[in-house]
Image (tube, rainbow, N blue to C red):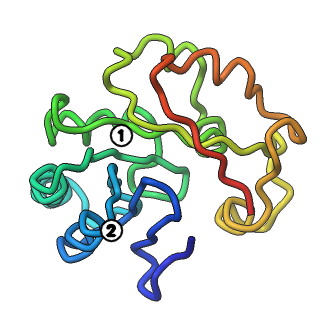
Amino acid sequence: SGDRADGATELLAQPLAHFNAADDAVAAAVEGFRQAKKRREHLDGAAAALAEVLLADVVIERGMTFIVEFAPTNAIDTLAKALTAIDHVGTDRCQVMFDSMHFFRSGGTLAEIAALDPARIGYAQIADAPLVSRHATYMEEAMFARQVPGTGELPLREWIAALPPHCEIGIEVP
């Protein structure tokens, strides 16, 4: 997987597509992807909410599930902000994605996952990392220094136990 030159899109070799343009949604649907997620957000407020709704429409019309990922370096940088974006799109039309590294580094707690309606959780990615970064930037670590599950310090067993049983979990390591 990899980012496009504009830093906004990646298509993964799994049933998940990342994009921010309708053309990419069409391409993903043609390729047989089942899910699509908004990876980066360059807009704020009402403009961002409208963009999410319009993109969700394109995704859903093509038979995919729209999911929102939060990460410390994104405008949607916490679970709370991801849930707000989902509320704008419609909770029946959109779900949240949990990346273990992003979740714990954004200050997330296991109690927050346990408190969520399981239907709001669409996908999870697991990777390990130290509890505190030793890298110059978060993105450097996230892209190039993730660890194989069980080799870092994140409470991954508890994280998995907090996710609903139906949640698909992919492994994301360099």
Q: Position of residue 154 (x, y in %)?
A: 78, 33
Mark 1: few/some/many CA within 10 Å (<14, 14-19, 20+): many
Q: Amino acid at mark 1?
A: Ala
Rendering quarter of residue 83? top left
Residue farthest to the right? 151
The label nearer to you, 1 versus 2, is 2
State the SS at label 1: helix
State the SS at label 2: helix
Q: Position of residue 46 (x, y in %)?
A: 12, 54
Q: Position of residue 128 (x, y in %)?
A: 77, 43
> In the rendered image, which residue does mark 1 sit on?
82
Q: CA distance from mark 1 to mark 2?
A: 27 Å
Q: Nearer the viewer, residue 129 or 149?
A: 149
Q: Nearer the viewer, residue 4 or 135?
A: 4
Rendering quarter of residue 155? top right
Looking at the image, which residue is at 44% across and 34% down?
A: 79
Q: Position of residue 20 (x, y in %)?
A: 28, 68
> In the rendered image, which residue does mark 2 sit on?
31
Looking at the image, which residue is at 65% across and 35% down?
A: 104
Q: Amino acid at mark 2?
A: Glu
Looking at the image, which residue is at 45% across and 22% down?
A: 166
Above or below residue 26? Residue 158 is above
Q: Is residue 75 left or right of residue 12?
A: left
State the mark number for residue 162.
none
